[in-house]
Amino acid sequence: MRRPLAGLALVIGLIALIAGARYYSRIHRFWGITQTDFSVFYQAGYQIDRRASMYEQHPTHYTTDKEYLFKYPPPFGFAMIPWSRLPIQVAIRWWYGLTAVALLGALWGIRRLVDPSLQDGRFMVIAGMALLAVLRPFLANLRLGQIDVVLAGCLIGFLVAHRRRRDAAAGWWLGIPILCKLVPAVWLAYLAAARRWRALGWTLLAILTYLASPIPHLGFAGTRGAVMEWLGTLHASGGNHEWLLRYKNQSVLSAALRVIAGPQAETVTGGQLAAAMGVTAGFALLYGGWVWRAMRISRETDDPLCALVAPSLVMIAMVIFSPHAWIATFIHLLLPYAVLGAYLVTRAPDDRLGWGLFLGSVLLVSATAPDLLGAASRAAHIASAVMWGAVCLAIGVRRIGRGNVRAGR
């Protein structure tokens, strides 16, 4: 590896290590006495293990706020049973282990997607750039015990299987994030647009199979009842517009509402919500055109980076067009950052605009953290800085599909 690349890799590694150690020391939670997303997952596993409802409020010394009500499907709670049988302080360590495996698996998959023949030194730089870019979302996942890193790993696994035309494997990988978060269902539209009907069919079969997985434990009637409870919970929580007005919500819809209703608004009228949804729909149509064009370009070339433009744009869309885009969900930008980083490092090191978009995106997504900006962080989030960082990343990735790879610019 050339000295400049070695130096860059070293700098990235040191920054990530120092920032990670310092930030994690400040977000340390005494697991078992504070409420987090993981404590909700843990409690759901405890409840389903005893054939009790996962969707009713069961106050404990670490889960009391109705905001932390379990909203995931019954198979997720069923999968949490092994964790719930451990003391929560032990369970979180195994959860962190699963998170680490998922992150390493995602990086392995990204290497397979970007270029398996890429020199180790170059890929270390690309991976370091991507990890540094998503450091804040990754630490948020650790702080909350969220599942988004695992889902990101599943989506990367789906794309690897999709690239290799292993439709069954692709379907089983994709079914997990769709069932857990629903928003990844946008990948079903991607498969349909790509005419990958077998992969689409396998995904639907996987979702149905996962939904049926609690039957051995709950029986048919119990599983059906749990699924209906889950759907009812989703319907009830979907009408909570207060979450759309929170400044930490960095979705396109939330950004539009902050402009239309005002940044300090606590309620939203039907007209304001309709206007914000109209703005979001218009933006989504424009963005969908970008994805469609990227898919068409990818069919005309065997270049692996061009083939990753459309999936990267879909990954970004999955985050910012979700009604609730909290910082932990931005871990899904790992692939787009790696793709843009690979383009800049291996194809266009002199592309100043590309580097500017990459660095600008990192600053908006990760450098707007309260630990760095203090009180100014709130103002940055009210201005939807994180969302605009994702938009900068999308513009940078889109450049790869506009002839820049072939031209070497």
Image (cartoon, rainbow, N blue to C red):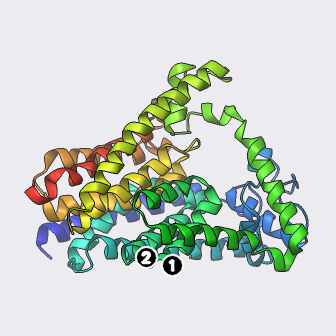
Q: Nearer the viewer, residue 257 or 64?
A: 257
Q: Nearer the viewer, residue 194 or 216?
A: 194
Apparent side of residue 394 relative to residue 44 in the rendered image (left or right): left
Secondary structure category for the residue under label 2: helix
Q: Nearer the viewer, residue 16 or 399?
A: 399
Q: Is residue 132 visible?
A: no
Residue 333: percent from the left, percent from the top?
41, 55
Kindly identify the residue that appears in the image at 21 percent across and 60 percent down: 343
Tell me the crowding category of disc 1: few under 14, some 14 to 19, or many 20 or more residues within 10 angstroms, Cα based.
many
Residue 121 sits above or below residue 195 on the image: below
The correct choice, above or below, for 104 with respect to 31 in the image is below
Q: For the residues marked 1 and 2, what is the alpha-carbon distance in whole angstroms? A: 6 Å
Q: Classify residue 372 as left or right of residue 126.
A: right
| Residue drawn at 75 percent across, 59 percent down | 40
The reply to whether discs 1 and 2 touch (Cβ–Cβ < 8 Å) is yes
Q: Earlier in the sequence, mark 1 or mark 2?
A: 2
- Residue shown at the point (47%, 36%) measured from the top left: 377
The image quadrant that residue 172 belongs to is bottom right
What residue did someone put label 2 on? 161
Q: Which residue in the structure is indicated by mark 1?
A: 169
Q: Amino acid at mark 1?
A: Ala
